[in-house]
């Protein structure tokens, strides 16, 4: 942990009593709201002069210019660390790519090349953003509240590492899906524990089994009451003024005919996003933070802020806004004892923009109707995305399916979205039921319930260690 100086620790109490965080999937600032620059030139967005060659190694390659014709996106562009390396540096990833002898300048010219290599014709998709009127909810939020056009990914890699940084300021070294850490649960200290230690409350409002369970400590019995079904509790808690101090909203990650996904992940329709629900939270002491999980993020806090465009003012000359800025800012708002890692100690914070002596009274109470972008219905028979595979594997851990021969690969092979959604939902429900029974039976609250322990035939040290890691015993 990184302690803070005594002078900073003595800061005056913040007027903010609740921070609500929503992390959307696999969209970028430029893609979603980059063309707002056409409405407000102060925004560091798109002009149409930006371009990428189809081939970075061909000096005569045709260029693909950035357009404003983004619509429904079906295929998911590459976002592994290898893909992002090619997008940023314009050269394909190799094992020697990160050595000191092979450094190349980050020209940001490999997006079209990478997209075209993955799927013929995808270059046009990735080199397009939405016209403001095509995403009217985001447009209205950006016009009414603060927006940050310099918010960066914590690590140039896939979904899970970046999500981990939001609440713990580290991915514990992960740059992609780490199956062993899924089994054990990521062990680092999180913002949730820091808040609890200081006497503050937190809550996770989920619509499908929550991804925050990738953190090992949140699987403990004592935290079971921190998870709330969004549809049943969020609006009521807003109206009652009973929201916890730190709120995380978890979306619908599986796209179904009856309940479409609303996490913005391709191929999900961005019109299904949660923005129409967030305005239920209009208390004068609340701060809403929306970020996208991919590069060049937007940031939209409210509801008591003027519209503004933020740049970090420290704490270091090199500090930037990135996912760890959320943990760093929450630490300052609630005067928590220490930072989680060196990353959130370095990250830019945004509590300084909360300068009003009184709350705004001109905030919108409703938002415009979203424009539906997908003509067809949800594809329940679609293959799983990498993130959905991770959710299935986590559900298998909670459900005690580790000891079965089907874990992990055969568990996800051949699964479609519909079947996976049912499995994840069932596994989480069973886990919650068993945790509830364990609490009633007096099981120590720091325990992590293992529904079915791995087979006990082997008495090897490795097997015993594995059992302890999975079940939460020392």
Image (spheres, rainbow, N blue to C red):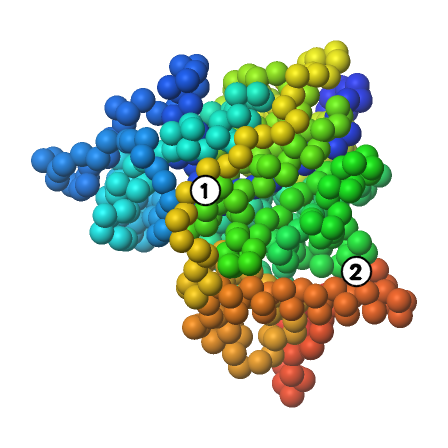
Q: Could you tell me which residue is drawn at 31 percent across and 34 percent down?
A: 69
| The C terminus: image quadrant | bottom right
Dot 1 corresponds to which residue?
372
Alpha-carbon neighbours of circle 2 within 10 Å: few (<14), some, or many (≥20)? Answer: many
Nearest the camera: 307 or 226?
A: 307
| The N terminus: image quadrant | top right
x and y percentages locating residue 406 in the rendered image: 52, 78
| Left or right for 366, reference 440 | left
Cα separation between marks 2 and 1:
41 Å
Res. 221 mark: 2
Nearest the camera: 191 or 133?
A: 133
Judged from the image, the secondary structure of the residue bearing numbered disc 1 is loop
Q: Could you tell me which residue is drawn at 77 percent across and 50 percent down?
A: 226
| Left or right for 63, reference 192 | left
Q: Could you tell me which residue is drawn at 59 percent across and 49 percent down?
A: 251
Residue 79 seen by the camera: no
x and y percentages locating residue 67 in the rendered image: 29, 31
Depth check, mark 2 against mark 1: the one in front is 1
Which sits earlier in the primary sequence, circle 2 or circle 1?
2
Res. 332 mark: none
Q: Could you tell me which residue is drawn at 51 percent across and 66 percent down?
A: 418
Judged from the image, the secondary structure of the residue bearing numbered disc 2 is helix
Q: Of all residues shown, which one is farthest toward the left?
A: 60
Q: Of all residues shown, which one is farthest toward the top?
A: 357
| Left or right for 126, reference 16 | left
Q: Of all residues shown, which one is farthest toward the bottom?
A: 457
Nearest the camera: 121 or 411?
A: 121
Nearest the camera: 309 or 39?
A: 39
């Amino acid at each position: 942990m990184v302690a803070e100086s005594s002078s900073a620790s003595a800061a005056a109490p913040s007027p903010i009593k609740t921070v609500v965080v929503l992390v959307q999937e696999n969209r970028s600032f430029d893609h979603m709201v980059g063309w707002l620059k056409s409405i407000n030139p102060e925004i560091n967005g798109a002009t149409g002069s930006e371009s990428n060659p189809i081939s970075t190694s061909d000096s005569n390659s045709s260029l693909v210019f950035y357009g404003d014709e983004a619509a429904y996106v079906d295929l998911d562009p590459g976002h592994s660390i290898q893909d992002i390396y090619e997008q940023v540096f314009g050269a394909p990833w190799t094992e020697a790519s990160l050595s000191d002898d092979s450094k190349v300048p980050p020209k940001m010219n490999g997006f079209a090349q990478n997209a075209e290599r993955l799927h013929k014709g995808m270059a046009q998709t990735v080199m397009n953003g939405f016209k403001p009127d095509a995403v009217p909810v985001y447009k209205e939020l950006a016009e009414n509240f603060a927006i940050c056009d310099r918010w960066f990914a914590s690590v140039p890699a896939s979904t899970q590492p970046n999500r981990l940084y939001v609440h713990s300021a580290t991915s514990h070294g992960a740059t992609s899906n780490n199956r062993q850490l899924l089994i054990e649960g990521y062990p680092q200290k999180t913002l949730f524990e820091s808040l609890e230690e200081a006497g503050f409350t937190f809550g996770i409002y989920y619509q499908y089994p929550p991804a925050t369970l990738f953190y090992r400590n949140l699987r403990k019995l004592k935290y079971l009451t921190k998870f709330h079904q969004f549809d049943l509790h969020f609006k009521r808690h807003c109206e009652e003024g009973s929201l916890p101090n730190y709120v995380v909203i978890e979306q619908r990650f599986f796209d179904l005919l009856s309940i479409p996904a609303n996490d913005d992940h391709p191929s999900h329709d961005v019109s299904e996003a949660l923005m129409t629900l967030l305005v239920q939270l209009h208390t004068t002491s609340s701060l809403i933070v929306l970020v996208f999980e991919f590069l060049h993020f937007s940031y939209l806090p409210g509801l008591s802020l003027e519209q503004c465009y933020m740049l970090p003012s420290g704490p270091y000359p090199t500090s930037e806004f990135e996912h760890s800025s959320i943990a760093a800012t929450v630490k300052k708002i609630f005067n928590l004892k220490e930072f989680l890692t060196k990353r959130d100690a370095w990250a830019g914070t945004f509590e300084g923009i909360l300068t009003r002596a009184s709350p705004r009274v001109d905030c919108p109470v409703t938002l415009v109707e979203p424009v539906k972008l997908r003509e067809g219905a949800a594809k329940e028979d679609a293959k799983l995305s990498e993130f959905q595979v991770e959710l299935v594997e986590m559900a298998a851990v909670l459900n005690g399916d580790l000891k079965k021969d089907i874990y992990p690969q055969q568990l996800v092979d051949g699964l479609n979205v519909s079947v996976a959604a049912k499995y994840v939902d069932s596994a989480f429900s069973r886990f919650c039921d068993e945790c509830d029974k364990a609490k009633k039976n007096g099981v120590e609250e720091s325990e992590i319930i293992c529904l079915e322990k791995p087979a006990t035939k082997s008495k090897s040290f490795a097997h015993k260690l594995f059992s302890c890691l999975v079940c939460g015993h020392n």
